[in-house]
Amino acid sequence: MLKYKIFLFILFFLFVGKVYSWEISDFTVDIEINRDSCIVVTEKITANFSDTPKHGIFRDIPIKYRDETGRYFNFNLQILGIYDEEGNPWTYTKIYSKEYLTLKIGSPYKTYQAEKIFIIKYRVEGAILYLDNHDQLYWNAIGTEWDAPINNVTINVRLPVVVKSELLLIKSYSGRYGLRQDSLNAKTDGQNIIFRGEHYLPYEGLTVVVGFPKGIVEERIRTYQERGHSRKDSFQNYDKDYQKNDHMFYSYSERRGGAINFSFFISFLIPIIVFVIMFRLWYKYGKDPKLRKSIVVEYKVPQDLTPIEMGTLIDDKVDIRDISATIIDLAIRGYLRIVQTEKVFFRKNYGFEKLKEYKSDNSLKDYEKIILSALFEESFGKNNFVDFGKNLGGGFNPAYTSFVELSSLENNFYTKLNSIKESVFLQLIKKGFYAKNPQKVVSFYRNLGIIFLTLGILLTMFSSFGLSIALSGIICILFSKYMPAKTKLGVEVYGKILGFEEFLMRTDKDKIAVSERRNIFEKMLPYAICLGISSKWAKIFSDVYTTSPNWFLTSYQDKFLMADFIADLNHSINIMSTTFVSMPRTVYSGGGFGGGGFSGGGFGGGGGRSW
């Protein structure tokens, strides 16, 4: 296996030359802070198209953010003008998406193969942070999403008045997104703060922080976006001429092409070689041992697997459905209760009520404790006991329990997903079902494929090898999900899981004592969820409940129907699935006078590309 990895590594660097089809010679940003808390930003971008003809640039400006309280808000951003160094206006089109305003600058009828200057001027409301003891501009002046190198950078922040230098907080952070080291020494005369830098690689940026005493600017109330609000579709101004003239790109590529030669033969051969290598790697290391025994019906849970372990062995992944099934399993076992509530417009919402302590409970697996901790111990939730109690009546005692709303876990629970997955795979490796962590195996080949794909796209503009390297990357990505392999024991248990699934599908409740039906239904329900047969399992036991069970408290206690209960149970699983994976684009302050910012943090940012 090592020799194949070495070959792929060499292949990565074999055809790497100059991979940038354009660069930014100089990037100057002037930020003028006004007394009304608005800022006026002027970006002067000197783009060098000398290597490859270009029409112009795209400039992507973020307009949607999330603050430290978890609420979303949109910038009020007004484009004041886009022009060249002589004041001549550039042709441009605005394209709005959910989180960005994209400016497509240039004409599809013109190309340039020289340095061109783009001056973008815009006004922003809501960019000032009002902290306890000072106000602050935390601005990602050079975003981390530019796909070209930037040679020289100058940032000038101008305050409305002169301020003593000892009263100013001045910091800057540069590099890839998330880097926290302070990068530049700024100069100031008390009103202008100037930052300078040079030699930034693609996707490296510069964030500046300027804090100043209160009273210099007016404090404005930020307008937050209501949950569920969607921006009005702004794509109506999409540049149709761009679509009409898409052939200009192809004609340029065709001019670079030539007759079939040796290099073309090599570029054709590379994806085939990579496919053969990946197939041999899969056959030797990724293919599961053959299941030699026929599948027979299993009448009990194989190997004392938990629902999440069973769901993982089925597809070598810890799915969100498996985590949701584990939460239901923990509820049935008495660790928590799922609570349904009615809110505005009868929209059903859910929450979790903690029923007993779990940290010292040795009967719980590590990943079960992580899940419970993610629900109750991370301070994500909000206590709304009174409202819920009014809606639900009896059966819910807020005085002695902890409660968390499912909606409050949005954009927060995802931080625990990797820990949960790592713990599950560690447990399965200890049991001998896997030799290596399937998630890490998939990540290795997928990341290798992404590297090839990215490199290939960059090379495509000026090298015949670009497409073949990109195709090689796609081949690695497609193979990645098939590379994890079970051990012989893991395959045997997998066969027993299939037999257990057959048992659940064939179960005849009439052959089960009435007193045992409810217990069997609840015990096997989480496994049925992981196997994707929960609806069929519930249909078999369609009359097991006459009132909602203690572990799932509904808002219709007096008019209980089993069909409604199953529908609400499935709905809660769907809501959990979307909530647990939701991730924010977050903006925090620069950390006050104590620091704590990072490159790519703050308002502003984004990036751009040529076209």
Image: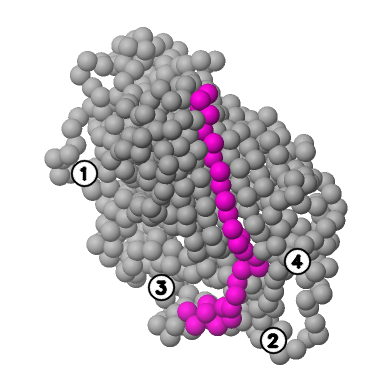
Kind of element beneath mark 2: helix
- Label annotation for residue 263: 2
Question: Does the segment drawn in magenta span residue 284?
Answer: no
- Determine the CA span between mark 3 and mark 2: 40 Å
Residue found at x 46% / y 25%: 217
- Determine the CA span between mark 2 and mark 1: 60 Å
Q: Which residue is mark 1?
A: 364
Q: Which residue is mark 3?
A: 289
Question: Does the segment drawn in magenta span residue 11?
Answer: yes
- Seen from the viewer's position, the closer of residues 18 and 353 is 18
Q: Which residue is mark 4?
A: 113
- Determine the CA span between mark 4 and mark 1: 65 Å
Of label 4 and label 1, which has the lower sequence position? 4
Q: How many marks?
A: 4
Residue found at x 33% / y 31%: 380
Of label 2 and label 1, which has the lower sequence position? 2
- Determine the CA span between mark 3 and mark 4: 58 Å
In terms of image quadrants, where is residue 233?
top right
- Seen from the viewer's position, the closer of residues 544 and 270 is 270
Of label 3 and label 4, which has the lower sequence position? 4
Of label 4 and label 2, which has the lower sequence position? 4
Kind of element beneath mark 4: loop
Query: Which dot, 1 or 3, sits closer to the camera?
Result: 1
Query: Which dot, 4 or 2, sits closer to the camera?
Result: 4
Per the rendered image, the range of residues in magenta is 9-37
> Is residue 257 shown left or right of residue 21?
right
The residue under label 3 is which amino acid type?
Answer: Pro
- Residue 73 in view: no
The residue under label 2 is which amino acid type?
Answer: Ser
Compared to residue 545, the image places residue 113 above or below, namely: below
Residue 406 on image: x %, y %: 39, 29
